[in-house]
Image (cartoon, rainbow, N blue to C red):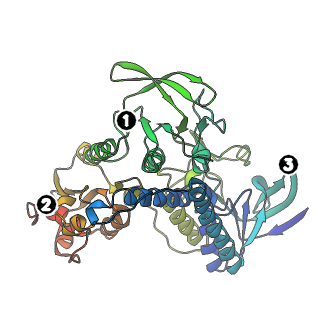
Amino acid sequence: MSTTQFDLIVIGGGPGGYVAAIRAAQLRLKVAVVEAAQLGGICLNWGCIPTKALLRASEINHMLHNLEEFGFAADNVRFDFARVVKRSRAVSAQLSAGVAHLLKKHKVTVINGFGRLAGTQGDLRKVSVSTDGKETAVLTAPNVIVATGARARVLPGLEPDGKLVWSYREAMVPTELPRSLLVIGSGAIGVEFASFYRNMGADVTIVEVADRILPVEDAEISAFARKALEKQGMKILTGAKLGAIKKDADSVTVEVTAGGRTQPVTVARVISAVGIVGNVENIGLEGTAIKVDRSHITVDPYCRTAEKGVFAIGDIAAPPWLAHKASHEGVMVAELIAGRSVHPISPLNIPGCTYCRPQVASVGMTEEKAKAAGYKLRVGRFPFIGNGKAIAMGEPEGMVKTIFDDATGELLGAHMVGPEVTEMIQGYVIARTGELTDAELKETVFPHPTISETMHEAVLAAYDGALHI
């Protein structure tokens, strides 16, 4: 067992932890990352990245079956499902190796093992590292970042069993395409899996306890997305409650009550996507001043916990639970530790993206929340059917919605549904971060022909100036 001193110890090598380590190393700090599993965390290995590889494959499958309008014909279109899954795993492996290379390049010490807070040694914090339950090292540093992430929430009676009931992990590495699926939960994870499997040919039913799918999104965008998904053949039950669950040899029957009617839904497989639980267990929080609220560590705007020298970032801390938020927090905390002047992150400036077909993206307040906050609003809407590039692409299904404060011209929120909107939302994020108003956005020149022109039109529409509708 060895003892090594660092300037910063990061517990967890996910998108928050490894980015924090790299930035701290760039600022001349001596850094260690303790990771029990794979570098890149859930995001890179079992979340953001492999799901996008799967979704890309499903988009290609959809395109190959809908070539006629472009003048093409493809006979005997087929896919090798095992190779689709294999490619997604290869993409993750490549990027995980890339993270290892980056940490080595920046001379960050990577220690494989389970890290936990282990008290103090003078002015230093101690972190114990263990493998298979045996302590292998004790590290010390004046600062520790806890970035242990989160795991899937499990509903009683719907525990993943590796065959009939899946979490995101099982849903990412199936041995074959199931003929039918019940997806429980319609947040980003649930809707993305529903989109993937539907585009690959499975019958998909979504069950959501809230009164609409994608409940954190603007209600108008949520309704648009639902209509688009139903048009693709998905069944969607909202305001739903689950009843009895019966497992057979190769199917599951779930009693679902929605709209005042109870019905049995029988499917080959069930995907449970009902949120996350922070990984706060066994990481040494007991005996510290750190507070935990519903499985997540309480932090201030600078990600400081109530324990001196201990920070928490990413999914273990406050929402929104997004990889890009974790990475940005990692940079902020590393710079704070290094003595740099930093600004806290505004949750309203963090974009949210869902990579279904059509995609959904947003930043800032929904119309409902902006009204509740007392603003007098100017709301602009522009449909993709009015955009030349969208029609040329054969992707006219979508809309952009902007919400402005009538008194000041501040962009309170922007909401988008349609092709590639996850790539476009950053324009509105920059506008919010830079505190631009309607005046600057109206004067911004957008290139033609692009689908980004819908963003400009939605701004103009808020002030009765849209040109192409």
Please rate how many residues cluster around mark 1, counting C-alpha atoms within 10 Å: few if below 14, some from 14 to 19, many from 20.
many
Which residue is the site of mark 2? Answer: 461
Question: Picture quarter containing residue 66?
Answer: bottom left
Q: Indicate whether 182 appears above or below 121.
A: above
Q: In the rendered view of the protein, which quadrant contains the N terminus?
A: bottom right
Q: Is residue 351 visible from the viewing direction of this image?
A: no
Looking at the image, which residue sits at the far right?
A: 1
The amino acid pointed to by label 3 is Gly
Which residue is the site of mark 3? Answer: 133
- Tell me the CA gap for discs 1 and 3: 45 Å
- Which residue is painted at 42% across and 31% down in the image? 209
Q: In the rendered view of the protein, which quadrant contains the C terminus?
A: bottom left
First-in-chain label (1 vs 3): 3
Q: Which mark is residue 236?
A: 1
Q: SS at mark 3?
A: loop
Q: Is residue 106 left or right of residue 446?
A: right
- Which residue is painted at 44% across and 44% down in the image? 187
Q: Indicate whether 87 appears above or below 184.
A: below
Q: Position of residue 140 (x, y in %)?
A: 78, 64
